[in-house]
Amino acid sequence: MKKFITINLALIAVGICNAQTPQLKVNWADEVSTSISTPTLQVVGNPMLRRKAAMHDASFKAVKELNADFVRYVPWFPYPKLAVAELEPPTATKTSWDFSLIDPMTIDFLEATKGHSIIMNFSTIPQWMFKTEKPVAYPADPNQVSWAYGGGTELRDSTMKELTDYYVRLVSWYTKGGFTDELGKYHKSGYHYEIPYWEVLNEPDLEHSMSPQTYTKIYDAMVTALKEVLPNTKFVGLGLAYEKPEWFEYFLNPANHKPGIPLDMISYHCYASANSGQKFEDYEYAVFDKAENFINTVRFVENIKKRLSPNTKTDINELGTFVSEEMRTQPIPARYWNLSASVYAYFFIELTKNGIDVIGESQLVGFPTQFPDVSMVNYINNKPNARFWVLKLIKDQIKAGSKLVNTSIDHNKGDDLLAQGFKDADGKSILLLNKRNKALRVTLPAELKGAQIAIIDEISGDNQPVYVPLKNSYIDLKPFAVALIKTAN
């Protein structure tokens, strides 16, 4: 009798355990919405993208092989010599136009993305165009960072002609073969690249501390001037660091713009950061909570856009995660890259559900002293890391136009897992991610047995995922793993 009871208690325990295992459910017949989203990335100019730099070759190779649209290119103010083509104001006898350090990186980007709808953003206004008590110096060494270069809050030329003339000449250098400078001298480049999209400045709510009113005036002036050079180009506005309602309310209201100014697309950013002093073991809750809060903000912003300018598209073109400040001085744990990759997969699912047009991961290259935690290339071995491979997996397998279908996970306590089913003419896909720093098993629908599955986790490391047949009725996901299950129709 005692033996009988023990055996049955064991069977009951097994049954309870199985009942509590998360179970994926996909109703392929229940189409919830149609995706309009394009996954992509941003490339921020920095010394590691210079020719002969350690990360250069592998990084641009990765961009070319990604083969994505809407890749964003941003030469940025911390490296003035790599971002600003006229570092000194013109005088009566000379100008300082110089593209010799800017061109190699820019041309490598334009060649790697040729044929695609890229977004160009030379975001750094020459500092001398702003009123300051004294000139702001910049390093002689182009590889030396200079966080102070962006000083000043008021343009010295209130008509903004000085500003717009600079950008017309810069754009002409890359699209019209050259330009005539302030003294009447012609500078020949021989370049005739296409610029499908131009984004006007970057994070103006931080850089130069602009108000939405000031930024809107600059946007209108820039678009008006650049349209003369780039009549077929579309424009991206805002590029905000923070989602401040007053910016969207003002900028998206056509009444606040000059007649005829297009509002083709807006952009803004989100970095789901760890909290100060937080240990890596606790990151999973902080970063996913912040990512979830951001999705709520996106819904709010999209409602503003639909009310004021419904035909304007949205590009959330900087999405990433940050470690705590304390950890930036230490080696970043290898598992962090899987956490960050999982967060991007989360963003992709949720932003696709919310009808976001472009979902851009940030950024191609970071390294110690320069935002190492957002790099998509491993700065130790120069191989694309998990953050890159998740982007490429999604980009290759989930296309705009795919149908999102009803997807759920039963017994998903604490929302540890997230999944979304997609289907298109080529087949069916399920994107599945583990939000937790622990291994989790997921029971799969019987129909998926034999499907192809690719997993990005701590085992795949800096290597691309390989599709293998699904042999079991379940899948084991390692901490922060991302999986994509692919079946034929």
Image (spheres, helix red, strand yellow):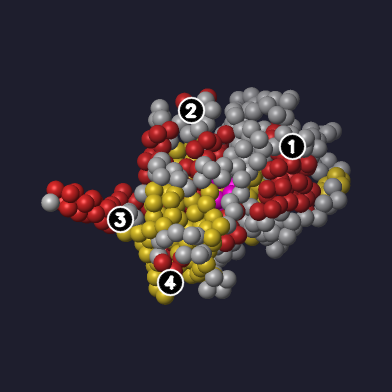
- Label 1 or label 4, whichever lies nearer to me, is 4
Under circle 2, the secondary element is helix
Question: Which residue matches tag 4?
Answer: 28
Q: Secondary structure at mark 4?
A: strand
Q: Amino acid at mark 3?
A: Asn
Left or right, 407 with respect to 20, comes to right
The magenta stretch is 387-391
Q: Earlier in the sequence, mark 2 or mark 1?
A: 1
Q: Is 391 rendered above or below residue 461? A: below
Would you name the residue on which mark 1 appears?
A: 50
Amino acid type, mark 1: Arg
Judge depth for marks 2 and 4 and give the one in front: 4
How much space separates mark 1 and mark 4, taking CA atoms? 47 Å
Question: In the image, what residue occupies the spot 68% across and 26% down?
Answer: 144
Which residue bears the numbered disc 2? 327
Q: Are marks 2 and 1 in contact (CB under 8 Å)?
A: no
Q: Are marks 1 and 4 in contact (CB under 8 Å)?
A: no
Q: Is residue 480 visible?
A: yes
Q: Which residue is mark 3?
A: 18
Q: Residue at x 48, y 34 (%)?
A: 323
Q: Is residue 378 above or below residue 137?
A: below
